[in-house]
Amino acid sequence: MSFADTGATPYYAVIFTSMRTEVDDGYSEMDQILSEAAEKQPGYLGVESARSGVGITVSYWRDLESIAAWKADATHLVAQRQGRERWYEEYVTRICKVERDYSFKKD
């Protein structure tokens, strides 16, 4: 795993926090389709994700318009519907403006 290369601030983060159902049928395939579709979206900067009980996926975007376009994307709309019907017990989506970031990496 690597961290998203978001570039200079400001940019936006969409934080998707979820609890999954026991149903896994088609989830990995849809995740791959969504990842490929998101990468083609104008304004997409990257993604970071982790799951250990609670899943947290943070996608990074240049601006609010890019986020709105992704939310309305046809492939994403199908995934949203299937997620509510099959894969998620519950989820929360939060949209934040990142005003500052900094990092550390050991040599």
Image (cartoon, grey):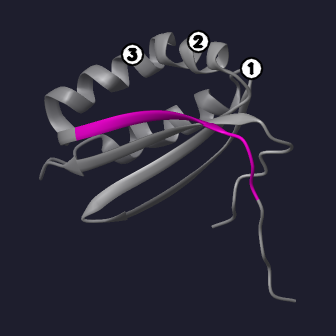
Q: Amino acid at mark 2?
A: Ala
Q: Which mark is residue 28?
A: none
Q: CA distance from mark 2 to mark 3?
A: 11 Å
| Residue plotted at (40% across, 53% down) | 56
Q: Secondary structure at mark 2?
A: helix
| Residue plotted at (74% across, 24% down) | 43
Q: Is residue 104 left or right of residue 46?
A: right
The answer to whether marks 2 and 1 mark residues whose Cβ atoms lie closer than 8 Å is: yes
Q: Which mark is residue 42?
A: 1
Q: Residue furthest bottom?
A: 107
Q: Which residues are magenta?
A: 91-101
Main SS class of the magenta portion in the image: strand
| Residue plotted at (39% across, 16% down) | 77
Residue 30 or residue 38, whichever sits in front: 38
Q: Residues within 10 Å of mark 2 (few under 14, many from 20)?
A: some
Q: CA distance from mark 1 to mark 3?
A: 17 Å
Q: CA distance from mark 2 to mark 1?
A: 9 Å
Q: Is residue 89 left or right of residue 19?
A: left
Q: Position of residue 20 (x, y in %)?
A: 20, 50
Q: Amino acid at mark 1?
A: Pro
Q: Position of residue 75 (x, y in %)?
A: 46, 18
Which quadrant would residue 55 be assigned to in this image? bottom left
In this picture, is 79 found above or below 94? above
| Residue 100 among those drawn in magenta | yes
Q: Secondary structure at mark 3?
A: helix
